[in-house]
Amino acid sequence: MTSPPSFDPVLLAVLSNRMDAIVREMTNTLLRAARSAVIAMSRDFSCCLVTGDGRLLATAEAAPVHVFGTHLQAQAMTELHPDLKEGDAFLHNDPYLGNTHPADHTILVPVFCDGVHLFTAVAKAHQADIGNSIPTTYHAAARDIYEEGALIFPCVRVQQDFQNVDDIIRMCRRRIRVPDQWYGDYLAAIGAARIGERRLKALADQVGVDALRDFVTAWFDYSERRIVQEIRRLPAGRLENTTCHDPIPGVVPDGIPLKVVLEIDPVNAMIDIDLRDNPDCLPCGLNESMACAINNTMTGVFNCLDPDIPHNAGTFRRIRVHLRENCVVGIPRFPASCSVATTNVGDRLVNATQSAFAGIGDGWGLAEGNTALTSGCAVVSGRDARHGERDFINQMFLMGGGGPASPVSDGWINLLIPVGAGLLYRDSVELDEQKYPLLVKSLKLMPDSGGAGRFRGAPGTEVVYGPRKRPIRVVSAPDGWRTPPRGVRGGLNGTLSADHVLQADGVETKVEGFINVELQPGEFIRGRDCGGGGYGDPLEREPARVLHDVRERWVSRQQAETVYGVMFHQPASGTLEVDEPATQAARLRLAEARG
């Protein structure tokens, strides 16, 4: 760490970008070849490269919730299969063996260069269905893995000599609800991983195996130096933050209290994250897998550091996550269900970690973002009368999810959920209606839902949809209906989430904690996700920004005047303008009223 690197820095930059380019090509392959909308439209998947000895190397624009733990899966592959050879591919969705949750089917392809297992190409994709006992990949109410019902593959060989192992394919096709859709997604993932394999082998032929080995060492050392510099900017100290996942009536009636403890040691350039002081595994599907406990807290840390720092095994050397066995945010003990491990509690961990950094002082950390997997992000299923009563199932992303405010900017409207780090896509209404027998009645942003602050949290989204000619089942596990995303440094909280079934006679029924309803034609469901928390005192927000928000109808004129203290006048031209003297007087009154 103290000696200058000997590897050519120009070649280091070229090869690091080449690795990312390979990951992007894998990503494009999977995005364009997949069949289900959750992959091909919502982009709920990620690709990455891992070294042959199980260290995360390149992620490009992969979602951290997917890839920050893939080194655990790659290590499991080499430990379970000492007979690895070219042409192999493995299917791995076991949350007790390094995967995130069972819905994330992961394809691992060992890449051999000159006969040496030099890399592993990884493609991980959230499936539309995995054979659960109910039609959802998020079974929050499952008391254990048996009630969850997921078909688990603990890193099994699914291709040998580049050919499918038909036994595994038959198992999936027999158990999964829409087998052709799954098989198309499987082929897309295999294709993406094989693309990575071919590009890596070509690169090894071009520069040589020894040069690639030297590059890996130099790249990890460079990445470590970058994060060392960043950690040494931080003040030493202990940051502690608590939060709570909302109850699931009849399953987790009191909610799940959570604690994150951060120890920052700038002298030794280390950050320790301690999650051991948390409840034991619970009889529900909200338990974090080991991979998710690691990746979600690390995401919260990286959200607060220089975004240009590489995210790989080199930077991971400087962040230690302390877990304990049989903990809801630790190392799950079989048969505890991890069905919803990637979201919900995971979103709370991201929020609690990033908002803890705001305790350092103004200019640090972030507020909290949307935590709600509302009905706008539900798994919908049924039969499509337009196509001969064909079965369908898919997870939609019609929500927006209010993003958290930062010390320098307002929250992002299309965050969706914190674990996605803004990398998932919101669905196209038109394409969802084409692919599935749904009618989306409305989709809009909700005024005054983003937490007020010097920088404002993003507004939440409301979506209303229902079936056409046949009933549809809607399953989801919303959070944030009791505990909203919190603001920091004087910023206000975002709004709560809410889900209502709208019956044909106009009666509205609120659904909380776990949604599992069948909608009949003429009925609709309305989902409102949370607005993001604000950062800093709302009275310090630039009046021009408040004016812009009012014109966009993200903030009402009433909130602008009563919360932000920004007053307006409307000249003869009819355009709303800030009344500067009245604003100064209003802000003075509001500040005095606070005492």
Image (spheres, rainbow, N blue to C red):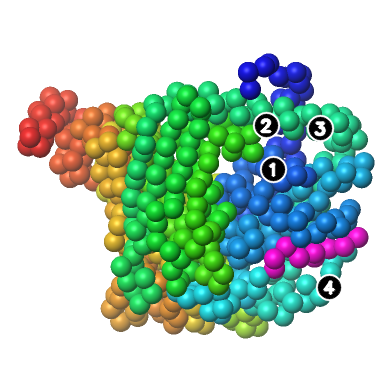
Q: Report the side of 9 relative to 290 (left or right).
A: right
Tag of residue 212: 3
Neighbor class of circle 1 (other Cα within 10 Å; few <14, some 14-19, many 20+) is many
Quarter of the image that includes the N terminus = top right
Is disc 2 surrounded by few (<14), some (14 to 19) or many (20+) residues within 10 Å?
A: many
Residue under label 2? 220
Label drawn at residue 166: 4
The residue carrying mark 1 is 55
The reply to whether the C-beta atoms of the residues labelled 3 and 4 are less than 8 Å apart is: no
Q: Of the residues under marks 2 and 4, which one precedes in the sequence?
A: 4
Instruction: Answer with mark 3 or mark 4, whichever residue precedes in sequence.
Output: 4
Q: Amino acid at mark 4?
A: Asp
The span from disc 3 to disc 4 (Cα, nearest Å) is 35 Å
Q: CA distance from mark 2 to mark 4?
A: 39 Å
Whether residues under marks 1 and 2 lie with C-beta atoms below 8 angstroms apart, the answer is: yes
Task: Say if mark 2 contacts mark 3, CB within 8 Å.
Answer: no
Q: Secondary structure at mark 4?
A: helix
Is residue 62 one of those drawn in magenta?
no
Q: What are the residue bounds of the magenta stretch?
A: 153-161
SS category of the residue bearing label 1: loop
| Residue 462 or residue 344, whichever sits in front | 344
Residue at x 62%, y 42% (from the top left corner)? 61
Q: Position of residue 399 (x, y in %)?
A: 44, 57
Looking at the rendered image, the disc whose residue lies closer to the viewer, 1 or 3, is 1
Tag 3 secondary structure = helix
Q: Earlier in the sequence, mark 2 or mark 3?
A: 3
| Mark 3 residue type | Leu
Q: Amino acid at mark 2?
A: Phe
Q: Disc 1 or 4, which lies upstream in sequence?
A: 1
Query: Residue 293: where, in percent of width, then height?
Result: 51, 53
